[in-house]
Amino acid sequence: MTNLNNREKAFEEKFQHDEELRFKTEARRNKLLGLWAAELMGMTGEAASEYAASVVKADLAEPGEDDVKRKVLKDLQDHNVDKSEHQVIRQMADLMAEAKKQLMEQ
């Protein structure tokens, strides 16, 4: 019975670790996305960092990543930056890979 309990605990710990890693990766991706969008909108320095933080916070509005995509698309449109939904989705995918790479290097 102890062996079964140890195995169950190991699965729970792995699940928790995987979820933490997923959360950190998505947060990193969102920050990178925010910096990318900020640059397209002509923001630099502190303004770009603040915008990137707002993109990270936007992900907490609802489950999934649609809230982030909608925010970035709307902000780009408000600043007359010509990017399609497909382009933002593609950038999100590319930056997810970059975020994973960055976290693995830490």
Image: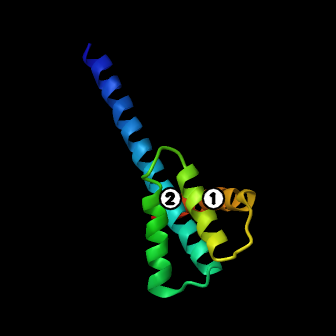
Q: Residue furthest front?
A: 78
Q: Is residue 51 visible?
A: yes
Residue 74 percent coordinates (x, y): 61, 64
What is the tally of numbered marks visible in this picture? 2
Look at the picture and state if 77 lies above or below 41. above
Q: Quadrant of the N terminus?
A: top left
The residue tagged 1 is 92
User: Image quadrant of residue 7?
Assistant: top left
Q: Residue furthest left?
A: 2
Determine whether the residue tagged by mark 2 lies in a helix, strand or loop. Answer: helix
Look at the picture and state if 61 lies above or below 8. below
Determine whether the residue tagged by mark 1 lies in a helix, strand or loop. Answer: helix
Query: Crowdedness of circle 1 by 10 Å Cα count: few (<14), some, many (20+)?
Result: many
Residue 54 percent coordinates (x, y): 45, 67
- Identify the residue at horizontal 53%, vertical 86% (top origin): 44
Q: Distance between the Cα atoms at labels 1 and 2?
A: 18 Å
Residue 80 percent coordinates (x, y): 69, 76
Q: Earlier in the sequence, mark 1 or mark 2?
A: 1
Residue type, numbered disc 1: Met
- Name the residue nearer the viewer: 90 or 61: 61
User: Image quadrant of residue 82?
Assistant: bottom right
